[in-house]
Amino acid sequence: MNVHLRFLGAVGTVTGSKYLVEFDGHSLMVDCGLFQGYKQLRLRNRDPLPILPNRLEAVILTHAHLDHTGYLPVLTKEGFRGKVWSTPATRDLAQILLPDSGHLQEEDAAFANRHGFSKHSPALPLYTEQDARDSLKYFRTAHMGEPFEPIRGWRATFIHAGHILGASSLLLEVGGRRILFSGDLGRDDDFLMNPPDRPPAADAVVVESTYGDREHPEEDLLAELGPALQRVAARGGTAVVPVFAVGRAQALLHAIALLKDNGILPQGLPVYLDSPMAIQSTGLFSRHLGEHRLDAQACHAMESVARMTASVEDSKAIARQHGPKVVLAASGMATGGRVLHHLVQYLGHHRNMVVLTGYQSPGTRGATLSSGAPHVRIHGQDIPVRAEIVQLSSASAHADASQLMDWLRAIPAAPRRVFVTHGDMAASDALRQQIERQLRWQALVPEHGSTWAV
C-alpha cells in the first residue's frame, strides 16, 4: 500500500503551502497556508479543497507565517476538528498572526464596502477575527526533536529550520516511508536566528526554493540599511518600511538599535513600529531565548528602539509628526494592513523613501514598487511613486541556492525523489537542475493538485 503526497499549494509560487499526505484511509495536511500575490492565486483561497475538512485527521505546521498557516481558520470554519500540531513558539505566534489576519480581512472588506471599489457587493472577508480565534483551540505542541503521533501509527518530529521563531523542518514517518519537509529554511548566517539543524535521511524530500536561483550578497544588513536611512534622515524625509511582522520586523529593529549604538544613525531619529502584530511578536523573543542569537539585553534594546503604535489613533498620529522618521509597518509585501495608508501618505514626495526588506512575490504591491513602476494601485486608486525606492538584498530570512544545496547535501543518504516547491517557477526549476546535476538525485517540480506515491 502506497503513501500518497498531494500538492495543494506552493508549487510554481511561494504562497499557499499545503501538502496532503494519505495512507490506508487516513490523511493529514502539512501546512495550511494562504495564497497571496496575483489575483488568480488569491482566488484559490475561495476554492474548495479536494478533501472535506472533516475527513482530515490532523494538520502539522512547519512555522507561523500566513502562507503556511493562514488558511487554517477556513479549514476549521468548514468542519475540521482534528489536532493542529506545531512547536510552542509557532503556536504563540499563531495566536497573534491568525486573529490579526482575520481582523485585517474584515477591515479591508469594510473599507472596500465604504468606498465602493470592490466588484462584490458586499465584499466579504475570507474569514473573521472570531473564526481565527476559534481555530486556535485545536492547537497542540511538540518540542523540537521530540517525536509525536499526529495519527495513530504515524510518527512526526520537528527539526530546527532557522528562518523565524519556532520554524521547523518536519520528518514524517508513515507506511514504512520517511518524508522530509524542509519548511522554510533559514540562513546559516542569519542576523537573528540560529542556523538550521542537519537533516535526517528520508525516502522523499519536499524542499523550498524561494531563492533557488539566487545567491545572497556578501554585504550585510547594517551596511545596506545604514546609508539608506542616513540619506532619508539628512533630507528630512520619512522612510516607510513594509515589514513582515514576524522575523523581518525584529531584524530591522535590531539593526536600527545597532546603527544608533554605533553612531551611524542619530539617537534621536524617531522610529515607529506600527503593527500590533509585530509589537506582540517582538515581545516573544524574550520568552524564547535560546531559539535565536539575541541575549536578554539585545532583546530589550530591540524592543525599546521604536515607539510602539498599537492603536489606530496612534497610527494616524504618525503623519502629524514633522521631520525625519522611520515607520515600520506590516505587511512585508504591501498586500494589506497599515503600511498601505503610509504609502498613500508618503509615496508622492521625492524626499521620502520606501525600503523593501526582502523577497517581493510577483503580483504584490511590493513587487510593483521594486520594478520601478511610476504608479501603484492602493484602495482603488493609482498612487504616483516619487519617493526613493530601496530594495535591500541582505535582509532575507531564507536560505539562498548554495545554502539550500548544502542542506540537501547534508542528508545522510540519497532520497528516492526530491520535490521542489515554494518558489517561482524559475527559482524552482533552477534548484531542480542543480539537484540533478550536482547530486545526481531524481528531482521534479510538481504540478498544482498533482498526487505522487512516495
Image (spheres, rainbow, N blue to C red):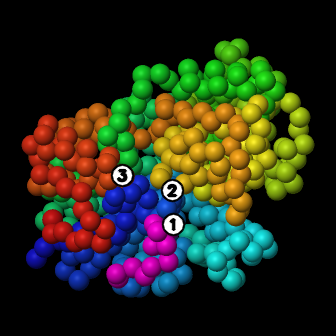
Q: What is the distance, in whole Å, between disc 1 and disc 2 at their CAs?
A: 8 Å
Write the start and end of the magenta stretch as one range.
Answer: 39-51
Is disc 2 placed on a helix, strand or loop? loop
Quarter residue 49 falls in: bottom left
Magenta stretch: helix, strand or loop mostly? helix
Q: Position of residue 126 (x, y in %)?
A: 58, 75
Is 315 left, or right, of 56 in this rendering?
right
Q: Dot 3 corresponds to which residue?
A: 423
Question: Quadrant location of the C terminus?
Answer: bottom left
Identify the residue position indicated by label 1 in the image: 39
Amino acid residing under circle 3:
Gly
409 vs 367: above or below: above
Residue 363 got which mark?
A: 2
Q: Is disc 1 surrounded by few (<14), some (14 to 19) or many (20+) residues within 10 Å?
A: few
- Was residue 146 drawn as part of the magenta stretch in this picture? no
Q: Three-letter amino acid code at disc 2?
A: Gly
Residue that appears at 43% across and 82% down = 48
Mark 2 Cα-neighbour bin, 10 Å: few <14, some 14–19, many ≥20: some
- Whichever of labels 1 and 2 marks the residue nearer the N terminus, that label is 1
**Disc on the earlier residue, 3 or 1:** 1
Secondary structure at numbered mark 1: helix
Task: Report x, y in % for residue 390.
Answer: 60, 33
Q: Secondary structure at mark 3?
A: loop
Q: Earlier in the sequence, mark 2 or mark 3?
A: 2
